[in-house]
């Protein structure tokens, strides 16, 4: 399962952005984690696409990355971020 959930979320966001007026305004959503962008950047992009403000999502993502350490995956960070932000 790994990154399949994250990939699906990012793909759906890309599809939705393309249907927005103006064709998404040049927004490019990667289909998978981008080298150099990292999990934090990809998680922020996905959560912003779901309507969360960067200012509320960024601290949650950083905390989760610190807690999960080097074994953190985009899938787990997104799932746990959504749980934390839903509170």
Image: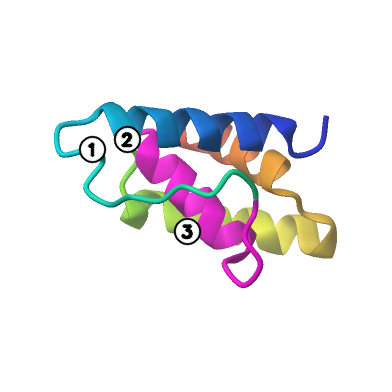
Quadrant for the N terminus, please. Answer: top right
State the extent of the magenta-drawn residues as a range. 33-50
Q: How is the image coloured?
A: rainbow
Task: Indicate which disc, 1 or 2, sits on the residue closer to the N terminus.
Answer: 2
- Mark 3 = which residue? 59
Is label 1 in contact with label 2 (beta carbons under 8 Å)?
A: yes
Magenta stretch holds residue 49: yes
Q: Residue at x 33, y 50 (%)?
A: 27
Q: Residue 55 in the image: x percent, y percent?
A: 33, 56
In this rendering, position of residue 20 left or right of residue 41: left
- Mark 1 = which residue? 23
Q: CA distance from mark 1 to mark 2?
A: 6 Å
In this rendering, position of residue 17 left or right of residue 29: left
65 or 25, which lies in front?
A: 25
Task: Indicate which disc, 1 or 3, sits on the residue closer to the N terminus.
Answer: 1
Q: Residues within 10 Å of mark 2 (few under 14, many from 20)?
A: some
Q: Residue at x 28, y 52 (%)?
A: 26
4 or 68, which lies in front?
A: 4
Tag 1 secondary structure = loop
> What secondary structure is the magenta-colored segment mainly?
helix
Magenta stretch holds residue 2: no
Q: Residue 18 in the image: x percent, y percent?
A: 31, 33
The quadrant holding residue 14 is top left
Q: Residue 61 in the image: x percent, y percent?
A: 55, 54
Q: Residue 2 in the image: x percent, y percent?
A: 81, 37
Is label 2 in contact with label 3 (beta carbons under 8 Å)?
A: no
Up-down: is 59 above or below 11? below
- Mark 2 = which residue? 17
Circle nearer the viewer, 2 or 3: 2
Q: Is residue 87 visible?
A: no
In this rendering, position of residue 2 left or right of residue 22: right
């Amino acid at each position: 399962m790994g990154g399949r959930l994250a990939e699906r979320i990012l793909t759906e966001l890309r599809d939705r952005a393309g249907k927005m007026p103006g064709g998404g305004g040049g927004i490019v959503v990667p289909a998978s984690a981008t080298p150099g962008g990292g999990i934090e950047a990809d998680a922020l992009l996905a959560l912003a696409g779901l309507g969360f403000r960067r200012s509320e999502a960024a601290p949650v993502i950083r905390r989760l990355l610190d807690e999960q350490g080097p074994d953190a995956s985009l899938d787990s960070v997104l799932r746990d971020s959504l749980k934390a932000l839903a509170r």
